[in-house]
Image (cartoon, helix red, strand yellow):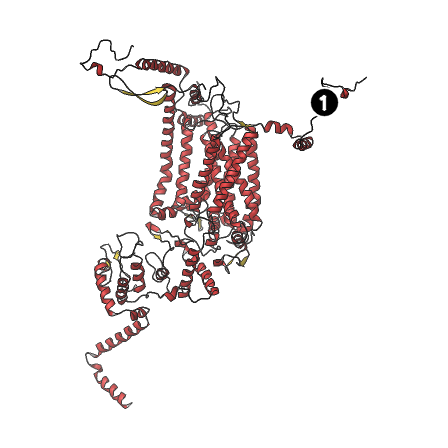
Amino acid sequence: MSIDTSKVADTNGTSSSSAAKPTKAGVVANWADERLGLATAMKKNLRKVFPDHWSFMLGEVALWSFVVLLLTGVFLTLWFDPSMAEGEYTGSYDPMRGVEMSQSMKSTLEISFDVRGGLLMRQMHHWAAMIFIASMMVHMMRVYFTGAYRKPREINWVIGCLLLFLGTIEGFTGYSLPDDLLSGTGVRAADGFMKATPVVGSYMSFFLFGGEFPGDSIIPRLYVMHVLLIPGILLGLVAAHMLLLVYHKHTQWPGPGKTEANVVGFPMLPVYAAKAGGFFFIVFGTIALMGGLMTINPIWKYGPYDPTKVTAGSQPDWYMGWPDGLLRIIPGWETELPGGYLISWNVMIPILILPPLMLTVLLLLPFIEAWITGDKREHHLLERPRNRPTQTALMVALMTFYGLSWAAGGNDIIAIKLDLSINQITYFMRAAVFIGPVIAFIIARRWCISLQRHDEGKLLHGYETGVIMRAPDGGYSEKHLPISEAEAYTLTARDRETPWSPEREIDENGVPAPNSRLNSLRAKLSTLMYADNVQKPTAEELDEARHHAEHELALQTAMDGVSADGHQFDGTHPVEGESLRGGH
Amino acid sequence: MRFLNRSAGRLSRHRRKPLAGLVVLLLGLVLTGGLYSLFSPGAQAETSTTSEDVTKGRELFIVGCSFCHGQNGEGVLTDNGTQYGPALTDVGAASVDFQVGTGRMPMAQPGQQAVRKPAVYTEEEIAQLAAYVDSLGTGPAIPDEADYSTEGLSDEERQAAITRGGQIFLTNCTACHNFDAQGGAMPRGGFAPSLRGVEPKYIYEALLTGPQSMPSFSNGNLTPEEKRDVIAYLEETSEMPSYGGVGLGALGPVAEGLFAWVVGIGALVGFAVWIAAHTTRTTRRKDGDIDETGAHA
């Protein structure tokens, strides 16, 4: 026989208990949870911890500028007409009125001059695109310099590289849409690049343009790529990038209490959501200010595209600047094959070979490193750039190559603004793109190792206090004091490295081990990576250093208050009871 | 008629005399020279200058220009055959007015290109120099203000002129001078100068005479009206407000990329540092707590 317990009082109070009236938000949340069952997932993820460091927010700049791109881009689609049909401009910009131009140029002028807020939106969209790709690149460098691409994050590195690549393509398609003089010149250049592909070049070009350049289908096709295809892929990749970030958890800097197995920082709600949300508004505001105050791509000055026209200062947007620079400095090499076929090395090398090669190198970096080190462990603690001298130097060398090529892309502007000869800039750059990265590699690597020595000095001899001591015999020395335990922990929170060497090259029967060539390459690279690095001091060395420091301190304490300035021993004073080393 | 026949007969008697050939040659030269100077463009300028101007111009020329351009403006060649200063025998008054009026001549020092600087000569002296150089041969005259001014056009005609001028400008000028007339680079340290702040007269003269690396746009190439239209477009666009905000030098995507990195990424990284520095860390500590530097609070 069952007892109805619902009527049984469970308090000693005189009135029966009843549930508190739920708040309005609670009612809504409960309604949603009963149907979606999100509470369990949210409970965990709203408390998800993110570590705090300025460099972890660089990727956020990219994310938020992408959001700005989506918002302003939707606004622009409402008025932009991606058609190459010719028509007479009749809008309010006087100097262009009556000029024949394509509908896309016409509608872009209309957005700029006749749509309320249109020019602001156009300029914000363009600035946001520049910042989107720039921040992706800065974020990527942060990830590389700190070793955040190591296991288990290699896939996310690959996704990031693809985002950078696709962002660049997305930027180029957008740059080409207004069909103004500058973008038309860019599309013409792209047509030339395609045609430089051996054998299939002209077919590819005719396929893309629907006939001979410019035709009337390139803008609508680029438009579909720009607003549908690439943004769709970008969104998907961004989602995957973020999901993997949540799944892997964020990396953190080493320090007391921070291990490979935890994440020390602030929870998503309320702290991190507020910070990230606030940062969105800062990014939005910065881009809005730039869009409102700084001219970008003044198409009304360029006028409509016409293959007979060109303007000085015709450059792509910055992210395409480095292949353009290589194109500007490469000698006019070409080979004529029998049958009159021409191989244009001068276009193929800088545009069709080097950029894909650079992307491939970037994609492979984590895997090459993993192969050299043979490291199969997970890494959630970051490395300081100085503690990975060879990798840091490698990225610096790549950046130097990139930077020099990039500068070559602005050779004409450099020439007029710095009063230089464009020819001399070209000759200089031809050599510098090869020599510069090598010099940069050597300097960056030695610099890192010097910084490692400095850290070692801090661990073993303490930090420099800036207090200069004069010894009784006249010598000067700087007083060093031991660093705090927390700092010492942080400095030593890294692995001890040993260059990898193959176990046995040749066995007892004189048979070389399989892959011995590959192994010796791996051994050489591992030696390059590790052999010159300064390893952290051993526990014994640290102990000894501490004892030494205590001894020094004792000696110096003995001197405190003793006026052993040397004048006692000048022959005119009695020296009874005086000693150079205090009471020691 | 009889008189004519008789004179012809008298002349004809001398036709086989030794000096006859010379006389015919002289007559022919005077006739062609006279006709040429009547119809050549330089003829107009000569009407407004006096022989006194030419004499004074020659004095100035001997002092200031002849070292490079030769005592009679015939030019000076260097040993290896290049020009020290080119011949000025057929450059015309417009060329002198442009080169000397904009301070490009006399050059302060040899260089890839003569640069604009404050004029060394007064307007009167420039006119005298121009008169002298013009007297050396042919060449375009200094344009009149009516040639490059849009005064007297109705608003609609003026607007049409500006639009037409813009298209001519974009077709012929932007390749070197940039879409906003800010100038651009030429080979070996040369450059196409900015056209902003250049007086219409000098733009017109530069078009006519093609100074330095510039091609000359003769009246057969760009009619005087078309030249006027280009100048009208340039004037219109320099008076125009900068619609998009600060122009960033109107140098195209290179300047934009620089600002995206320095201002955009610079500011945003600055904000990131600022946000990360202002954390929720509490400042209240209990006794015995150890802070990050390891010191006891």
Q: Nearer the viewer, residue B266 or B181?
A: B266
Quadrant, the C terminus of chain A: top left
Q: Nearer the viewer, residue A257 or A153?
A: A257
Q: Nearer the viewer, residue A95 or A30?
A: A30
Above or below — where is A385 with respect to B136?
A: above
Furthest toward the left, the residue is A572
Q: Is residue B227 left or right of residue A3?
A: left
Q: Which residue is mark 1?
A: A17
Rendering coords of residue B162 (x, y %): 45, 61
Rendering coords of residue A324 (x, y %): 43, 45
Rendering coords of residue A469 (x, y %): 29, 20
Quadrant hosting residue A358: top left
Q: Amino acid at mark 1?
A: Ser
Furthest toward the front, the residue is A14
Quadrant hosting residue A437: top left
Furthest toward the bottom, the residue is B2
Above or below — where is A303 with respect to A464?
A: below
Above or below — where is A572 with respect to A293?
A: above
Q: Please give the name of the residue rendered at 53% of the width and 35% of the height, measured from the top-left corner.
A: A278
Quadrant, the N terminus of chain A: top right
Q: Is residue B73 left or right of residue A418?
A: left
Furthest toward the top, the residue is A576
Q: What is the crowding at mark 1: few (fewer than 14 residues within 10 Å), some, or many (at least 20)?
A: few
Q: Is residue B14 left or right of residue A172?
A: left
In this orientation, does residue A501 appear? no
